[in-house]
Image (cartoon, rainbow, N blue to C red):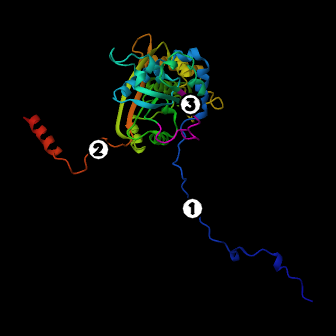
Amino acid sequence: MKPASLRPFLPRPALRRRFQPCRAYAIQSPRAPNLQVFDSNTKYLQKERAAAHAESSRKVDYLRDEVASRLCERLLDISRHFPNVLDLGANACNIARILTTTPPPAPSDPPLRTRLTHLTSADWSPTLLHRDADLPFNSLLPSHTRTVLPNPDTHPLPFSPHSFDAVLSSLSLHWINDLPGLLSQVATILKPDSPFLAAIFGGDSLFELRTSLQLADLDRRGGVATHVSPLADVRDVGGLLQKAGFKLLTVDVDDIVVEYPDTFALMQDLQAMGESNAALVRETNAGLRGLGRDVLLANEGIYRELHSEGGEKIPATWRVIYMIGWTAGKGQPEPLARGTGEVNMKDILEAGGKKEGK
């Protein structure tokens, strides 16, 4: 009788095992990568809380009203009637109020509100959007509706393609994570040969507060944290518009200097505007508990020493970037093809150099 074999119960030697070749591949997502810079939920809560106190929120509308007025001036430079206009990121409908309260350039000119037929004010904060819904300026517009927008990080704009004759946006798009994607959506909802006019805070806004907080952090805590949200630079705006498909681009910068009694009044106004820091890398209550009393007091002294110039009040600089782009359409001026120029720039420059030499 043969002894029982243990071979069926023993594992195969490692060298005799057969492995199927396996190789991992990187697959690109069908969407464009979206870099998350801001916490959209935090920004939503900041605006909702600020607008819940209507009176204090209206007191800090000075900056939004001023920028909305300057943006409307650029719209009125276009000699055209706009049947359907979208105010994207309307905040408290500041553009609608400016259109009804600003007098025309000449007494004989019609009111500014007659330059359009219907205005749609859209914003991501319902409380801020409807804050002034019962004020008289709403009845002065020919036609006005309000639309609450969904989260821009997860939902596209709820408008049909080619549905607006102009899109305006005043001091709202600087909180958008996917700004290139949103600009592409704006180009889609605009009709051919229609303008897009926007104003956003630029990268050098509140540079006085940025520098003083960094120095106060270094002095009191030995490090630097993010207390002011990052903003887009003017050099990037033109490229973003061009990438979105806009033509005939115009980008300019305007600095607005506002004086405050102290840094505490400045930060209080930022909170009442809903413009507090919303960067993902900011300090929160779960971390270092934000700015402490010693850092705030040091910031007040450093700010005055560097920027007050001996006065009782302190200046705060808001850099506003204005952008204008047009969707493609028939009859628009086009640049000449390469090689069709009749004047050589080299000859002009050499002629200028000879005149300076004489």
Q: Which of marks 2 and 3 is nearer the N terminus?
A: 3
Q: Residue under circle 1?
A: 25
Question: In the image, is 58 to the left or to the right of 75?
Answer: right
Of badges 1 and 2, the one in the foreground is 2
Q: Residue under circle 2?
A: 334
**In the depicted view, which residue is nearer to us: 54 or 88?**
88
Residue occupying the point 19% across, 47% down:
341
User: In the figure, 133 relative to 278: above or below?
Assistant: above
- Distance between the Cα atoms at labels 3 and 1? 44 Å
Q: What residue type is labelled 1?
A: Tyr
Q: Residue under circle 3?
A: 147
Q: What residue type is labelled 2?
A: Glu
Q: Earlier in the sequence, mark 3 or mark 1?
A: 1
Image coordinates of residue 92 in percent, x first then y, are 53, 23
Image coordinates of residue 205 in percent, x first then y, are 44, 27
- Distance between the Cα atoms at labels 1 and 2? 44 Å
Q: Residue furthest left?
A: 358
Q: What residue type is labelled 3?
A: Thr
Magenta-tinted stretch: 145-163
Q: Which residue lies furthest to the top in this view?
A: 312
Image coordinates of residue 264 in percent, x first then y, are 53, 16
User: In the figure, 62 relative to 4: above or below?
Assistant: above
